[in-house]
Amino acid sequence: MLTLTFLVKTLIDLYVMVLLLRVWMQWSRCDFYNPLAQFVVKLTQPVIKPLRRIIPAIGPIDTASVLLAFVLTTIKYPVLMLVQSGDFAISVYNLLFGLISLLKAAGSLVFWVIIIRSLLSWISQGRSPIDYVLIQLTEPLMAPIRRVLPAMGGIDFSAMVVILILYALNYLGMDLFQGLWLAL
């Protein structure tokens, strides 16, 4: 049972992260012809294309992707309960669980994108096409910190500061929602 629970939770979380990455890429106007952007679009297009006919975008925000990510995070908890105990119960609280899980997934996505950008900066040093997209995604978060905190000896600490802020927000979520934050 634990294996099935792990697989269901992981698949839902990964697809939600890809949907949120699509929203983030559209919002930051990333290069559409980049291989990473093409991968994200090909992975999400079969589901998002029919939804876009019903749900229009609001400005630069792809509301169809956000809504699908919210629906997936909302049904994740009842589906996990079905897998673990055989009970399937839907309540109003699942909407709160879905919103909290969506916020947690967005924070986790930002964390991993910054980590990957930092690691690729050591390896490819900006020559990879994926680097360009990661820079477009993370620069709006890191540039304000870079203006306040100057580089010290050629080392950029802005990624570390953003990660520390994400950790602080994660601990705030644990304080506010205690066991629920860790369960989702």
Image (spheres, grey):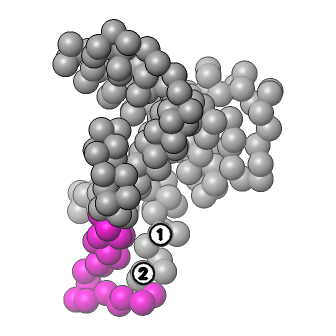
Residue 145's image quarter? bottom left
Q: Is 54 left, or right, of 24 in this rendering?
A: right
Quarter of the figure that contains the N terminus: top left
Instruction: Confirm whether residue 137 shows in the render.
Output: yes
In the picture of the structure, the residue carrying the numbered disc 2 is: 145
> Given the current orientation, which residue lies at the most extreme left position?
2
Q: Position of residue 172 (x, y in %)?
A: 35, 63
Relative to the observer, which residue lies in front, 139 or 5? 5
Dot 2: within a 10 Å radius of its alpha carbon, few (fewer than 14), some, or many (20 or more) residues?
some
Q: What kind of element bears circle 1?
A: helix
Is residue 108 in view?
no
Indicate the amino acid at tag 1. Leu
Callout 1–callout 2 Cβ contact below 8 Å: yes
Q: Is residue 93 magenta?
A: no
Q: Which residue is tagged 1?
A: 141
- Count residues near mark 1 (Cα–Cα under 10 Å), then give few for <14, some for 14-19, many for 20+: some
Judged left or right of residue 39, residue 1 is left
In this picture, which residue range is highlighted in magenta?
Answer: 147-168
